[in-house]
Image: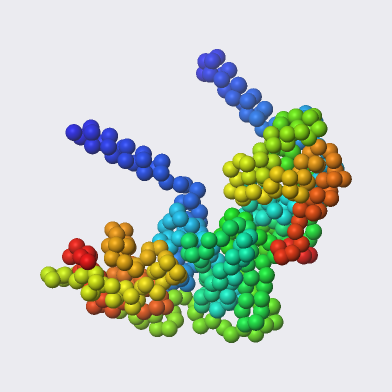
Amino acid sequence: MRTVSGFALVVSLAVAVSCADPVHDRAVDALGGEKAGVRQGPTHRPGQPCLTCHGGEGPGDLEMAFGGTLYAQQDSDAPGAGAVVRLLDSKNHTYDVTANCVGNFWVPRGAFASVYPVTAVATVQGFSRVMTTEMHRDGSCADCHVNPASAASPGHLWAAPADSDLPASDCKGDEDVKGVASKLATCTMVTPSCAAPFPTYTKDVAPILEANCVGCHQAKGQNPNPSLTSYRLVSALKTRVTMNTLVAQCRMPPPPLDPLSDGDRQTLACWIAGGAKQ
Amino acid sequence: MNTRAVLALLAGVVATLFGCSSSYEGATAQFTLPPETGFDSVTTPLVFFCGSIDCHGGVGRNLRLYGMQGRRLDPTDVPCGAMTKQAEIDADYQSFVGLEPEILAAVVKDGGKHPERLTVIRKARGTEKHTGGVVFAAGSDGDHCLTEWIAGQTDQAGADCNNAIPQNPRPLCVP
């Protein structure tokens, strides 16, 4: 029996090792850790190649087709907050996305049925800058666009001339603005103390999701995967596990949005604990 | 150490030396390849359509291209900076002819007939799996640009290479 168990362990380890992609793992490791005071979310890691983690191989939950960081000016680290980035594909399809307060912008996979080559125009405060070459396969802007400019990079993405007077962004990290830090400080893990009758999807869970989550998590939303628009989708095991982790830890809704109240998080936790009844 | 071990060590050293000593140009010099004449015309659409930094301007590609719209050879140049330089055209030529020199030589020997024997032509036409899809469809100006140059028809190739670059509305680096 012991021999069989040992063999099974060796086989499991061999399978696990053979499935890993060391190139991808090294690329993720090379990004380093999170900046102090900034949690995973829409404002983390500006200037890094988004699709390294969000390209489908993980570890990012959200899968992106395009993602990058727009800066205000060529030689400035000030974010191009509020800029509109318009992507234009070879079939003349367009998709507009707005850079957030650190300049990050992204297009979830599936939201823009683009056909390469794709190019882009960034517009902020009346200034526009057109991408003068094309993307042919890589939607991760920072794979090609990093400062300083070099033989392999035209420099980071920027939108306005050096002498333009753009308003400063009020955002340096997602926990330092708009009172988010204080909100998160009070976010504690909900320890379910659940008893029958357990919450149901229709009566208890759907209203919470409608009010806080479905705005983004729907087919035409910013993050359609997972979609949280029906009992079938929400009760899928992966969605339940993800929701239980991300919501319980106040990572969803993402800062600077308010986390769910303790009561709502308790309801979701008890719904799952009670068998996720419809 | 016995005799067999010494011989094995010696064989390893000799093999290593041989493995490291062949030069790139030496490897292609034995084949009759298209001369570089006229390749400056070919480089323009090749770099424009294929040489972006996320494609054949990338360091992982067998066909690695340098030029104005992509990766630069001179470390002091930047993409969309100075015009494509002769050293970049030379490097692109070496990369192109070094892909399948035996087959390329055979196509040249046949006066350019059946260029689809070359992987680069099949990939450009999209008849072989290519992440970039169909770049130069068979019979297009871009396709003629490549195949005519291979056939030694450099004047015709120059005209077709020039026509292969659309003017508007696609963007193009302006120095």
Q: Picture quarter containing residue A14?
A: top left
Looking at the image, residue A49 lies above or below residue B47: below
Is A70 on the left-hand or right-hand side of A230?
A: right
State the quadrant of the C terminus of chain B.
bottom right
Question: Does residue A49 appear anywhere in the picture?
Answer: no
Residue in the picture at 58% in, 68% down = A94
Is A9 on the left-hand or right-hand side of A61?
A: left
Residue A152: x and y in percent read: 67, 57
* Residue that lies at the very extreme toward the right in this rendered image: B155
User: In the depicted view, which residue is nearer to us: B32 or A218?
Assistant: A218
Looking at the image, residue B86 lies above or below residue A112: above
* Residue that lies at the very extreme toward the front in this rendered image: B139
* Residue that lies at the very extreme toward the top in this rendered image: B3
Residue B116: x and y in percent read: 69, 37
**Colouring of the image:** rainbow
Residue in the picture at 54% in, 74% down = A98
User: In the depicted view, which residue is nearer to us: B50 or A88?
Assistant: A88
Looking at the image, residue A15 lies above or below residue A238: above
User: In the depicted view, which residue is nearer to us: B63 or A74?
Assistant: B63
Residue in the picture at 53% in, 61% down = A113
Residue B117: x and y in percent read: 69, 34
Is A18 on the left-hand or right-hand side of A160?
A: left
Residue A87: x and y in percent read: 59, 67
Residue in the picture at 73% in, 36% down = B115
Looking at the image, residue A254 lies above or below residue A29: below
Question: Does residue A182 appear anywhere in the picture?
Answer: yes
